Amino acid sequence: MDDYSDTLDFPLQEFDRLLSKSKDLVLARYAELGGNAHPGHSQEQVFNWFNQPLPETGTDMDSLLDEIKTRVMDTPTMNIGPHMYAYVMAGGNQVSMLADLLASAINQNVAKWHLAPALTEIEKRVIQWAAEFIGYANNNDTGGAIVSAGSAANLTGLTVARNIFFEQAGIRENGLFGQKPFTIYASDQTHSSVDKSVQLLGIGSRQYRKIPVDQSFQIDLSALKSSIEADLAAGFQPFCLIGNAGTVNTGAVDPLDALADIAETYGMWLHVDGCYGALVASLPEFNDTFKGLDRAHSIACDFHKWLYQTFEIGCTLVRSWDQMKRTYHTTADYLDSSQESGNRLDINEHHFQLSRNAKAFKVWMSFKAFGSQRFKDMIRKDIALRIYLDELLVKAPDFELVTSGKLAISCFRYIGSGQYSDPEIRRLNTMIIPALEQDQRVFITGTRLHGEPVIRACIINHRKDKSHIDHLVQVIREVGSTLEVELTATAP
Ligand SMILES: Cc1ncc(COP(=O)(O)O)c(C=O)c1O
């Protein structure tokens, strides 16, 4: 790189040229959204591209951008394309991407109000809008935190739960010492981030009761009540119930209103993991499904899912900013802004992190650009496409629809054209996921339901239409029938 000055900056004209060249890389990528979903490079190949020594001197920026084009921009898994069905990958939106660039350009630290005045107010506004979007804004004081993702949103919600619930017992000062073991309850379909949170918070997996589910993968309420009663009788302290507003496996929504009743009866905290589905509560036709969400003490949401944001951004909502402060506030001489005037809110006093980037900005900019109605339209479209996929699967003799909740996940099996035994179908559906990855045209993953392997299509992506769903079924059929040949050739 040329030695321009004694800073790391380029002269403005050169910066302009590099921005423009970077923009060309973006446009080239967006001109080809419909290609294969998986790039298909081997681990060895990718390792070798980057197996380079730490550079002592710089590379000329044009060569560097060329290298980035071939090895990064031209090689992604196509999260942003219409053939992605794996895990929960929502594609992002272009306004969100532009916001990331703009926010990076001014590099604000959204720790304290006086460090980032506009972006602090924007973050508070986004928390308020999110609450309003899903019907949680009973007052104007909904508090919360913008966090890295859904896992952090669950950890944050459960941290507030623990610190507020045991506030009188001085848990922040005493830690867990002196408490009788307290127990936490959720369905056995609950996301693994809750297991991590329970371990991190010192509650311990042994105190985490995984309650069985019914046929629709919703928590079994009588098993839940029996478990709480048994714990009370055994001298435990039932403390928190977790409801799912959309499980990651099937999109099942627990009966949240009934959970809120149970939480009230036993004086427990109700946390809702809404990372997958809570944003669907914005649609009035789902009022019954999400009834009771507004009674939760804390809700975890994920904006890189059903608000189509670029990675990464999650959000925890709680009933008031005061609860956040009582959970996290500490003092330090070097952090005293000594300007505690008016309504300035210092986010570092309401959250674990100190230095923070301006993630909320992209949600704010997206809501402003599209309006909340457009997001609702896209969510509706995703759900309609899941229904369309289900219809195709039900009609197809070589597929079997196993389950699909009310949202946008469909779990199914490829059963082929022969008369296969259960173990053969199990094998077929285990083999098909890596075979589809190798095929590269679509990117889809599987899961296990009641121990049985299934193919799982998650449809959260505003770039899909019916033709993409037809393509998915066709690709699985083609790959599946190749595997059938193998299956019959290796039959005993
Ligand atoms: C229900 C649920 N909870 C939590 C998470 C974790 O979210 P993240 O991957 O953003 O950490 C997910 C992710 O899919 C999820 O579906």
Image (cartoon, rainbow, N blue to C red):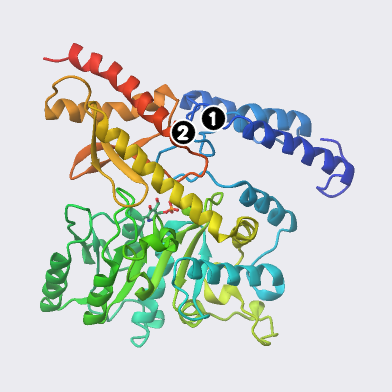
Counting residues from the N terminus, which is met first, the one under dot 2 or under dot 1?
Answer: 1
Marks 2 and 1 sit apart, C-alpha to C-alpha, by: 7 Å
Res 237 quadrant in image: bottom left
Quarter in which the N terminus is drawn? top right
In the rendering, at what x and y percent does residue 304 appear? 50, 52
Q: Which of 44/247 is in front?
A: 247
Image position of 142 with respect to 406: above or below:
below
Q: Are marks 2 and 1 in contact (CB under 8 Å)?
A: yes
In the rendering, at what x and y percent does residue 296 appear? 36, 73
Q: Residue at x 70, y 72 (%)?
A: 117
Q: What residue did someone put label 2 on?
A: 83
Quarter in which the C terminus is drawn? top left
Res 285 quadrant in image: bottom left
Q: Residue at x 45, y 25 (%)?
A: 441
Q: Which of 160/243 is in front?
A: 243
Q: Is residue 68 left or right of residue 265?
A: right
Image position of 273 with respect to 460: above or below:
below
| Callout 2: SS | loop
What is the three-letter code of the residue carrying label 1?
Gly
How many residues crowd mark 1 within 10 Å: few (<14), some (14–19), many (20+)? some
- Residue 87 visible? The answer is no
Image position of 340 with respect to 285: above or below:
below
In the rendering, at what x and y percent does residue 247 appear? 32, 54
Q: Which of 86/370 is in front?
A: 370
Q: Which of 107/121 is in front?
A: 121
Q: What residue did someone put label 1 on?
A: 34
Q: Is residue 181 left or right of residue 286?
A: left
- Residue 420 visible? The answer is yes
Q: Residue at x 54, y 30 (%)?
A: 34
| Callout 1: SS | loop
